[in-house]
Structures are given as structure tokens and as C-alpha cells.
Amino acid sequence: MTELPHTPLHSTLPQSRHLTTAVPGPRSKQLHAERLAHVSDGFGIVLPVFVDRADGAIIQDVDGNRFIDFASGIAVTSVGAANRKVRERVAAQLERFTHTCFMVTEYESFTQVSKWLNEHTPGDFDKRTALFSTGAEAVENAVKIARSATGRPNILVFDEAYHGRSLLTMAMTAKENPYRLNFGPLPGEVVRAASANPLRPSASTTGDAMTAALASVEETLAQHGADTFAAMVIEPIQGEGGFIVPVPGFLAGLREIATRHGIVLVLDEIQTGMGRTGALYASEHEGIAGDITLSAKALADGLPLSAVTGRTELLNAVHVGGLGGTYAGNPLACEAALAVFEELEDGELLANARTVETVARELLEPLVEETAIVAQFRGRGAMLALEFADATTLDPRPDLARAISSACHAQGVLTLTCGTHGNVIRLLPPLVISEDLLRDGLGVLHDAILEANAALRAPVLVADTP
Ligand code: PLZ
């Protein structure tokens, strides 16, 4: 039997950038108009094109345009959006059953996913895992577990943090607009400390940045009473906040502070985990382990699955029946996760993430010196970003980030922005991207930056004064 090019198990999507229409094309425009008639305006949109197919590092829209994917659906489709192993496992599971609810009757894949996460998350101690569906749910459950285990109410979070859009995680998230605006009152018992942003140290820090940042954390804890804190929750690299890699030693310092005060250290690796930074978990780069580590996003290649993994004495401190959810650890999503684990097992995709960094650094880092608008190139592995700011004042330039990102979109490269000031362009290509495609996409971004820089420096023509 010959297979059709579009059969679900054999993707033939060419891995190249190709534009057939202006972006967005006519069919996408039509579908977008229809969307506006039916879908809540509460959802924003980065690039209003409608997707027909996606695989590897290519997204093909309904007008036949092929985009290089530097977004991966926000760090989700790391092994490709139509990965063969994922499709095969999920298809086989679809034939068996789609759902039982793990609290009603059991299935083995839930256990196998938990076992793998217990073995592969950082921390040389006995662990248990609880599975859920979304990242926000994982964060909320980590808080429930930490409160239940410690009997304490408060949660410490940080400037620039992002932990989700549910009521509690929205309160834990730092940025007001769009995440918190008009949605209050917010749940209490969430306390925020200064983060350790190397480019923009908090105003109060003087001297050595790491020592100052840790002293400020101690101060915040002391104000509320360190023994009132159940957990401190932090992303090893702050994602939505701007791909901020903290000052070296800061996370190890937090590890020490948490241990000293009996506070549960929760590492939110929802965006950084599953190989994104060139290690399975970003905390490995810092040589630390959370008492609890959170996984989601790339865990199941787009099927909704999240995980809370941590010390057995914490995960088992909750009363029986205290954790759960109708869809928690859905069997289709668990099968997808098992396929993702197979893809990650030989380390090739982790090596590829590190190659992404090498290639991007070589091409983009010189722009910090060569232009007056790129303040920093930063990140790890395939989680990289450029911050746009005035070279002398460091004033954020969200207008430039937006304009350069739009220029990339118009040329078939899907970039995302982020950051407290919206002045950061981030790169999150699937880990399966080829070097050729990566270089093509980065070249478009590079040239768009040079053009924006040149436009800025072009002499302003003023009329002769008499
Ligand atoms: N923790 C570190 O990055 C999700 C947000 C997209 P959910 N980040 C993408 C948007 O604008 O809604 C995220 C994260 C970190 C938690 C979450 C939340 O994960 O699966 O979106 O709930």
C-alpha cells in the first residue's frame, strides 16, 4: 500500500521557508475575520495566520506559506509538532481508550511517566510524582503540597516571575498588564522578593550583585517571618519575564536559604525543562535541585500534561484524596510523554539545543557591540533572547522589539517577544531544527536588526533655517 503524503504517520512537510502570499494571506484573513465573530477578544494573537500543518521546525499555513518556527508553541513542540513516535503512541492509545480518570480506575502509563520523572529530575533523593494537565495547575498543586507538608501559609515569588493565569498563579506572576489587570482582588499570602537580573539589578542592590540579591531575599523573608513561608517558587531562567538568567550563584544561594529556614524550594521548570536549555532541567546548570520540580509544556509535545515531582515526604504529606482532577495525567498525554522520553533518551536533542546556542551566539552576540539597540544576548541552549534598549541609557525599546519581530514574521520567521517591558525577542526553536534552517531564520532576524539600527542612525532631515 502506498502512503499518501498527508497520512498522519508520515509527515512530508518540506523543512524550508517559503512564502506564496503576503503575511497573513487571504485565506488566513478570512478565517481571522470569522474568528473575531465568535471568539472572545480576551485572547491576543502573535501572528494571525491559520495553521494547516506543522512538523519539525516548519509551520505551514492555509495559504501555503511555510514559516520557520522559533516559538514551538511557547516551548512545547521540542521534538516536533508531528513527531512520529508521539503520533504512533497516541494513535495506539486512541484505539484502546481516551480516558478513565486516574482517580476512578488506573492505567500503567501514569505510573511509567511518574517513574521516569522521579529518575530524571535533579535531586538524589526518593521522589514521587503527581500528574496534572496545565502548567498553572502544577504550580498551584506544588503550593498545596508545600502548605500541607509545612503547615505554613506564605509563598515567596520573585520580580519578573511568570507562573500562570489561574487566580493563585496570576498573583504569583509579576507583570500587571496583561496578566493581572482588572482581575483582582488577588489571593493573599503571596510575597515578592527582588530577582537577580544581571542587566538590571534592583535599585537597592549595591556591591556584589549576588550577595546583594540574596541579602534582599533574606530581608523580605524576615519582614514576614521566615517561618511563615511554605515555599519559594522560582524559574531557573525566568521565561515570560524576559529570559533572565540570574546572576551566577543566586539559585545556589536560594537553595541554601530555603534549607536553612525549612522552606520548600519549588523550581518552576515548566518552560526551561525537558531539554530546552541543553540539559534535561535548567537547574542542572546551577548544580542544584529543588525539593519540588515542575514540568509541563514540552513534557507531552502539546498534549496537555504537567507534573509535580519531589521529595516523597512532601508529595505524600497530602491526605488521600487531596490531589486530583478529572483529566489529571490523561492517558493520551501520558503516551505522548513516554514518546518524548524516548526521543530525549540518547542525548542527541540536548546536544542539538547546545548547537542552537553556539550558532545563534556566533551570529547574534556581536550585535551588542555593532548596534546601538541590542543591550544583551542571553539564554541557554535553545532558550535564547535579545533585549532591545537604548545603548547608553538602557531605556527599554519595546517598539523596536515589536517592529523587528514583525519584520521577521513578514519574511516567514515566527519569533516571539517577552519581558516585563516587552522589549525582548526570544528564540525557542524546536530541538529538532536543522542547522541550515536555523541559520536561515537567524539570518532574517540579524538583517532585520541591522535595518532597524540603520533607520535609527539615519540623519534626520530638517529644513534649512534662514
Ligand atoms: N510557569 C515558567 O512559562 C507558561 C504562557 C503563555 P500553563 N508560559 C506561557 C500565556 O501567555 O498564557 C508557564 C511558564 C512557567 C507556568 C506557566 C503556566 O503554564 O500551561 O500556561 O498554565
Image (cartoon, grey):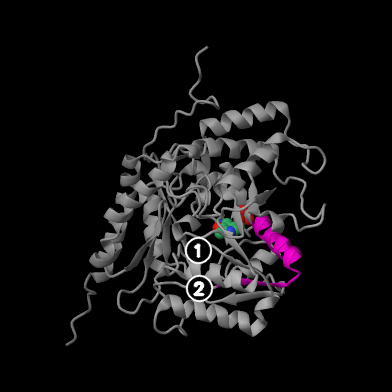
Q: Residue at x 71, y 75 (%)?
A: 188
Give the alpha-carbon distance from disc 1 to disc 2, as whole Å. 10 Å
**Vertical placement of residue 255 versus 292, above or below:** below
User: Residue 87 location in percent, x, y?
Assistant: 57, 31
Q: Which residue is mark 2?
A: 195
Residue drawn at x 64%, y 46% as measured from the top left: 305
Residue situated furthest bottom in the rendering = 466
Quadrant of image for the C terminus: bottom left
- Mark 1 and 2 residues: CB-CB less than 8 Å, in contact? yes
Asked if the stretch drawn in magenta spans residue 35, the answer is no
SS under mark 1: loop
Give the residue type that dot 1 points to: Gln
Magenta extent:
136-158
* Amino acid type of the residue tagged 2 in the rendering: Ser
Q: Is residue 291 visible?
A: yes
The verdict on label 1 being within 8 Å of ligand 1 is yes
Residue 209 in percent (x, y) is at 42, 77
Q: Is residue 418 above or below residue 350?
A: below
Q: Position of residue 195 (x, y in %)?
A: 50, 73
Counting every numbered tag in the picture gives: 2
Give the structural element (helix, strand or loop) at label 2: loop
Which SS type dominates the magenta stretch? helix
Tell me the residue that label 1 is attached to. Answer: 238
Q: Give whichever of 261, 382 is nearer the camera.
A: 261
Residue 130, placed above or below residue 19: below
> Dot 1, how many residues are within 10 Å of its Cα: few (below 14), some (14-19), or many (20+)?
many
In this view, the residue in front, 162 or 109, is 109
35 relative position to 202: left or right: right
Q: Position of residue 270 (x, y in %)?
A: 57, 54
Residue 149 falls inside the magenta stretch? yes
